[in-house]
Amino acid sequence: MPTTRYAELGAFLRSRRDRVRPADVGLSPGPRRRVPGLRRDEVAVLAGASVEYYTELERGAGSQPSDQMLAALARALRLSHDERVHLYHLANRPIPAQGGTASHVHPGMLDLLTRIGTTPAMVITDLHAVLVQNPLAVALLGDLSVHRGRSASFVYRWFVDVGSRQVYSEEDHARQSRSFVADLRAAVGRRSPSDAEATHLIDELLQRSSEFSALWAEHDVAVRRDERKRILHPTVGLLNLNCLNLFSEDGRQRLLWFTPAAGTDAADKLALLTVVGTQSMEPDPGRPVR
């Protein structure tokens, strides 16, 4: 990428950082703040990058960010659709197709997610790939941004990697399988018949999972809107939670959040998770999204 392009990328990042107020991303402005916008270290944390790396980007030092990093920066800086497209152009990267893990998160959902701090919440695609999580969702389910390609979809991992099911009690597995397949059929039906992402996902699941094939052949359709979940956490144990969903206008994304089920000790366990955070989470790429 030409040197001038690196400089333009850095200047653009600086200009967007300056206009984002801490409260916009759930941060306290603090009494001794010197800048009205975000600091470099705050953008780095929000995007999951090191401060040194992000500083290099702003200085136009020659670092070319990956597609995943560009998506994370776009979310951290609350870029509009047009600004996000411009960011990818400056980085000499192709614009990601809508629907994958680098999708532009619905602005309203991202704003709501920022404001939800006392309960686990995340934004996922209609194919069950996680776009962004709040800290408590990471503490509950692990960092789900580590998954790439087809494995970014939890439905795919559910049927292909049996280890991903450990978050649920075994007696819930059959019900979850049916629910996932019925929801996936509804999602695929909303998309174009020529949609490559959905078509390839279904084709591979039919080839790799006899359980999925049998359920798919039943043609059940049911969008997952609200369900009771029993989540098994390695530190706090079993949590009985309500899982609620808010859908974007086109149905391609949903904000889902977990609330304690009435009459259970889930509220106390979620409070404990806010204290222990991710410290007790062993690295486990198989942890699921829902």
Image: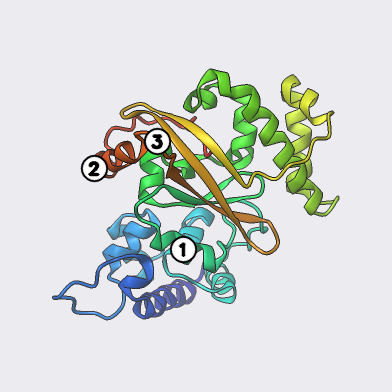
Q: Position of residue 133 (x, y in %)?
A: 44, 50
Q: Is residue 67 above or below residue 280?
A: below
Q: Position of residue 53 (x, y in %)?
A: 33, 58
Circles 1 and 2, Cβ within 8 Å, touching? The answer is: no
Q: Nearer the viewer, mark 1 or mark 3?
A: 3
What whole-number distance in Å separates the C-alpha atoms at marks 2 and 3?
22 Å
Which residue occupies the foreground of this view, 279 or 265? 265
Residue at 52 percent of width and 62 percent of height: 109
- Image position of 238 (left or right of 200): left
Upstream in sequence: badge 1 or badge 3: 1
Q: Position of residue 275 (x, y in %)?
A: 23, 42
Q: Which residue is mark 2?
A: 275
Upstream in sequence: badge 1 or badge 2: 1
For this orientation, the residue located farthest to the left is 32
Asked whether the viewer can see residue 269, the reply is yes
Q: Is residue 79 above or below residue 128?
A: below
Q: In terms of image quadrants, where is residue 208?
A: top right
- Numbered label attached to residue 263: 3
- Image position of 4 (left or right of 218): left
Circles 1 and 3, Cβ within 8 Å, touching? The answer is: no
Classify 10 Å Cα crowding around label 1: few (below 14), some (14-19), many (20 and above).
few
- Image position of 81 (left or right of 281): right
Q: Nearer the viewer, mark 2 or mark 3?
A: 3
Q: Position of residue 85 (x, y in %)?
A: 59, 71
Residue at 70 percent of width and 41 percent of height: 183
| Secondary structure of residue under mark 1 | helix
Q: In terms of image quadrants, where is residue 181?
A: top right
Asked whether the viewer can see residue 64, the reply is no
Q: Which residue is mark 1?
A: 112
Classify 10 Å Cα crowding around label 2: few (below 14), some (14-19), many (20 and above).
few
- Image position of 171 (left or right of 121): right
